[in-house]
């Protein structure tokens, strides 16, 4: 009897130990081994998210979902997902929580992708939610699109290939008939063509050889021209051109400076130039008014000079005080 009690005690102790270990293991797996901090996020689609859904931070389990609350958002609905994480766990302010499955057959988790902000969210704050991508819906949509393409495009295309193949068969049959009737003529033309090619190939080869020889001569002449001495001359010429370009640039700069100085000089002597122009205009007006009298005086002076020169020619002694000769024509 005593042995039975001992056995019952051992079995009960073992069961209680296993039960306590299972509770501890479940708490550790759920991230609920101590005090927690609560956060929340909003989503439009919470497929697979429920109480106990694991919350991971960069793949590390830190808590679980506590509650999913639907809330109206205008004409639509959104869902507030409340989750708890280990107390003191630092979540950057720009972190993003996304509903996703790590693997194809894995359970849905609320995965928090760490941000780069140096400021942490306070407990009870909102974590930015990012909608999950439904792979199965995408695969179903792609399969539907492929089915539509096969039904609307590929099948009519295959149906249209039948008449095309029949047309090709008829064309092939007609070509066979043509070959049967005109085969000898075609073979004769081919023989003639081959004969002409045999005659022209040597000529073409000679032309190619001449062209190659010309290229070789040109390359030799170019090589002879590009001797080290000629290359030095060309380099000197290029250097001189560079120097001339530099000198031209300097000359342009000096001309610009000279033009600037002239502009400044004109600006400084603007009054003097204006006075000079006024004097020139006055002189011109005076000459224009007196040009007639000047012309008359010049004409009289020219007549007097003519008379003086005529008398000197007749009697050069007048220069020494003589008298003019008698005018015989007047007598």
Image: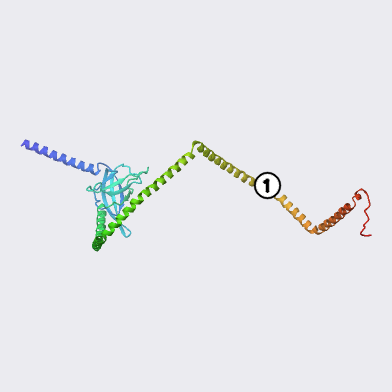
Relative depth, front residue between 239 and 106: 239
Relative depth, front residue between 172 and 277: 172
Relative depth, front residue between 251 and 329: 329
> What colour scheme was applied to this rendering of the protein?
rainbow
Instruction: Give the residue number, with chain letter if any, for mark 1.
Output: 265
Determine the secondary structure under disc 1.
helix
Q: Position of residue 227 (x, y in %)?
A: 49, 37
| Residue 184 in view of the camera | yes
Relative depth, front residue between 257 and 137: 257
**Residue at point 75% right, 53% down?**
280
| Residue 160 in view of the camera | no
Q: Position of residue 242 (x, y in %)?
A: 54, 41
Crowdedness near tag 1: few (<14), some (14–19) or many (≥20) residues, C-alpha within 10 Å: few
In this view, the residue farthest toward the left is 1
**Residue at point 77% right, 54% down?**
283
Dividing the picture into quadrants, the one containing residue 62 is: top left
- Whether residue 54 sits left or right of residue 276 in the image: it is left
For the N terminus, the quadrant is: top left
Q: Position of residue 91 (x, y in %)?
A: 33, 44
How many marks overall?
1
Q: Position of residue 275 (x, y in %)?
A: 74, 52
- Whether residue 102 sits left or right of residue 14 in the image: it is right
Is 63 rendered above or below residue 309? above
For the C terminus, the quadrant is: bottom right
- Whether residue 15 sits left or right of residue 203 in the image: it is left
């Amino acid at each position: 009897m005593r042995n039975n009690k001992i056995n019952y005690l051992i079995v009960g102790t073992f069961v209680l130990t296993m039960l306590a270990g299972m509770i501890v293991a479940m708490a550790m797996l759920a991230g609920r081994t101590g005090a927690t901090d609560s956060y929340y996020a909003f989503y439009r689609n919470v497929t697979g998210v429920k109480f106990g859904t694991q919350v991971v931070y960069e793949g590390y389990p830190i808590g679980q979902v506590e509650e999913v609350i639907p809330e109206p958002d205008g004409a639509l609905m959104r869902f507030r997902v409340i989750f708890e994480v280990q107390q003191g766990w630092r979540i950057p302010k720009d972190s993003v929580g996304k509903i996703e499955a790590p693997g194809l057959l894995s359970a849905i988790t609320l995965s928090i992708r760490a941000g780069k902000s140096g400021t942490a969210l306070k407990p009870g704050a909102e974590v930015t939610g990012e909608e999950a991508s439904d792979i199965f819906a995408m695969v179903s949509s792609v399969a539907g699109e492929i089915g539509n393409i096969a039904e609307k495009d590929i099948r009519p295309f295959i149906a249209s290939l039948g008449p095309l193949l029949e047309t090709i068969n008829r064309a092939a049959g007609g070509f066979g008939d043509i070959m049967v009737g005109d085969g000898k003529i075609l073979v004769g033309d081919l023989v003639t063509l081959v004969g002409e090619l045999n005659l022209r190939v040597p000529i073409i080869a000679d032309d190619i050889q001449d062209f190659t020889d010309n290229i070789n001569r040109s390359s030799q002449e170019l090589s002879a021209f590009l001797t080290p001495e000629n290359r030095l001359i060309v380099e000197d010429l290029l250097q001189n051109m560079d120097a001339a370009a530099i000198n031209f640039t300097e000359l342009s700069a000096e001309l610009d400076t000279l033009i600037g100085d002239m502009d400044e000089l004109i600006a400084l002597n603007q009054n003097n130039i204006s006075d000079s122009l006024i004097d020139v205009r006055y002189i011109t007006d005076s000459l224009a008014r007196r040009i007639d009298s000047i012309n008359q005086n010049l004409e009289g002076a020219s007549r007097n000079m003519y008379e003086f020169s005529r008398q000197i020619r007749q009697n050069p002694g007048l220069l020494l005080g003589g008298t003019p000769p008698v005018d015989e024509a007047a007598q």
